[in-house]
C-alpha cells in the first residue's frame, strides 16, 4: 500500500523484478493498453514504469569461471501504483457473488484477448479481486505481469508455461512445453471457482475427504532435469465429473454449474463426452474448447453461468470457514 499525503489517499503499490525477455511486456505498458481500449473490470493505474534498477548476474553466465546456470535471467526493477482498491476473492459473502466476480474477471480476460491481443496467463484466486462496494461487488482481474501479446510474441509464448500451479490447466501441467492458450486460462478460472468453493462454501465432506479433494490441485511429479509435471488428477476429475458429483456442495445452482463446466472442459481430453445436461451453450462451448479455440458464442465462458439458477435461498447461503 502507498499513502499520498497531498491527496490523503491510499493506493495499491506494487514493486517487483520483471524479466527482460523478448516475450515480456512491462506491466505498466499493459495497463496503458487496457485503459486505451477501455477494457472493463481491470484496475486503473495512476503511474508505473521501470525504477532504474537491474540485475547483473546474467552478464557472467557465459564466463569460463562461472558455474553453468541457465536459469539466471536479466531482471529489471518495475513498479506500478493502482488507483483501484479491492478485497480478496475469498472474502465473498454469497455463492452468487463469488460466481459474478469471477464472471467479471473473465469478461476482462476475453475483451483483453479480443480487442488488444493480450493473454493473461496467470488466472488464480489471488489475481481476481472484488471491489469495495458491498452493495454491488464486481470482479477485477489484476496482475498482468505474466501476460503476453499473442500476435507479437506467439512463438516465444509457445515454450513458456506460466501460472499458479494449483490453477494451471491439466493440459499444460501434463505438457509443460505446450503453448499456453486462451483455453488454458479459461480452465484455470474453473479451478479457481472450485478451489474457493471447496474452502469456503457449505459441503458434506469430512476433513480427510476435503483434504484429498484439495490435494488434486497440488499434485505433481518431479521430472529430474526437466520441468515438473502433473495435471493427471485434474484431468481425471474433469472426465469423471468428480468436482460436481463428489464434493457434496450444498448450493444446488453452483453444483449444476460445475457439472456443466466439467463436461465442457473434459471435451479437451476426450474425443466425445457424453452429454449429461441438455444445455445448448454448454454444447457450443464444448465444441469450441475441444478445438482449443476462443469462445465464439458472444459471451465469456463464465458469464454463461446460470446465475438465476442460484435460487433466492442459495444466493443467501453464507460461506463457511474450513
Image: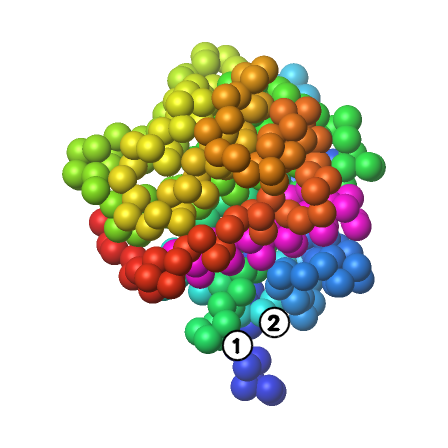
In percent of width and height, residue 4 lies at 57, 80
Circle 2 SS class: loop
Does residue 13 appear in the picture of this structure? yes
What residue is shown at x 38% (from left), y 63% (from top)? 312
Residue 10's label in the rendered image is: 1
Camera-side residue: 198 or 264?
Answer: 264
Residue 284's label in the rendered image is: none
Asked if residue 118 is among those painted magenta in the image, a careful observer would answer: yes
Q: On screen, 171 above or below 119?
A: above
Asked if residue 322 is among those painted magenta in the image, a careful observer would answer: no
Does residue 69 appear in the picture of this structure? no
Q: On screen, 93 above or below 306?
A: below
Q: Quadrant of residue 37?
A: bottom right
Q: Is residue 284 left or right of residue 270?
A: right
Mark 2, other Cα within 10 Å: few <14 / some 14–19 / many ≥20:
some
- The residue pinned by badge 2 equals 83
What residue is shown at x 46% (from left), y 29% (from top)? 276
Work out how far the residue at label 1 is from the one at label 2, CA to CA, in angstroms: 8 Å
Q: Residue furthest right?
A: 152
In percent of width and height, residue 128 lies at 51, 54
In percent of width and height, residue 319 lies at 29, 57
Label the magenta part by its dominant secondary structure: helix
Q: In the image, which residues are magenta?
A: 95-120
Q: Is residue 9 left or right of residue 202?
A: right
What residue is shown at x 54% (from left), y 60% (from top)? 139
In percent of width and height, residue 132 lies at 48, 72
Mark 1, other Cα within 10 Å: few <14 / some 14–19 / many ≥20:
some
Callout in the foreground (1, 2): 2
Q: Residue furthest front?
A: 278
Q: Residue furthest top?
A: 224
Q: How many marks?
A: 2
What residue is shown at x 41% (from left), y 42% (from top)? 256
Amino acid at each position: 500500500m502507498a499513502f499520498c499525503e497531498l491527496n490523503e489517499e491510499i493506493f495499491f503499490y506494487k514493486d517487483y523484478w520483471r524479466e527482460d525477455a523478448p516475450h515480456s511486456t512491462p506491466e505498466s505498458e499493459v495497463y496503458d493498453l487496457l485503459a486505451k481500449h477501455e477494457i472493463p473490470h481491470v484496475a486503473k493505474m495512476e503511474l508505473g514504469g521501470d525504477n532504474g534498477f537491474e540485475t547483473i548476474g546474467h552478464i557472467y553466465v557465459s564466463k569460463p569461471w562461472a558455474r553453468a546456470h541457465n536459469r539466471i535471467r536479466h531482471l529489471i526493477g518495475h513498479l506500478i501504483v493502482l488507483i483501484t482498491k479491492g478485497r480478496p476473492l475469498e472474502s465473498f459473502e454469497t455463492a452468487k457473488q463469488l460466481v459474478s466476480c469471477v464472471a467479471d474477471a473473465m469478461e476482462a480476460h476475453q475483451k483483453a484477448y479480443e480487442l488488444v491481443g493480450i493473454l493473461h496467463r496467470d488466472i488464480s484466486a489471488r489475481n481476481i479481486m472484488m471491489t469495495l462496494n458491498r452493495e454491488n461487488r464486481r470482479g477485477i482481474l489484476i496482475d498482468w505481469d505474466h501476460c503476453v501479446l499473442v500476435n507479437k510474441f506467439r512463438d516465444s509464448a509457445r515454450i513458456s508455461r506460466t501460472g499458479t500451479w494449483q490453477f494451471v490447466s491439466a493440459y499444460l501441467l501434463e505438457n509443460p512445453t505446450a503453448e499456453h492458450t486462451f483455453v488454458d486460462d479459461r480452465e484455470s478460472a474453473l479451478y479457481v471457482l472450485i478451489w474457493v468453493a471447496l474452502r469456503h462454501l457449505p459441503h458434506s465432506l469430512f476433513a480427510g475427504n476435503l483434504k484429498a479433494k484439495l490435494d488434486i490441485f497440488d499434485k505433481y511429479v518431479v521430472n529430474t532435469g526437466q520441468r515438473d509435471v502433473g495435471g493427471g488428477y485434474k484431468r481425471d476429475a474433469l472426465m469423471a465429473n468428480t468436482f460436481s458429483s463428489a464434493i457434496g456442495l450444498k448450493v444446488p445452482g453452483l453444483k449444476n454449474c460445475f457439472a456443466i463446466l466439467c463436461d465442457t472442459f473434459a471435451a479437451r481430453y476426450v474425443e466425445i463426452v457424453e452429454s449429461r445436461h441438455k444445455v445448448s451453450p454448454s454444447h457450443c462451448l464444448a465444441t469450441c474448447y475441444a478445438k482449443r479455440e476462443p469462445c465464439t458464442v458472444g459471451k465469456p465462458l463464465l458469464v454463461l453461468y446460470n446465475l438465476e439458477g442460484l435460487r433466492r435461498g442459495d444466493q443467501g447461503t453464507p460461506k463457511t470457514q474450513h
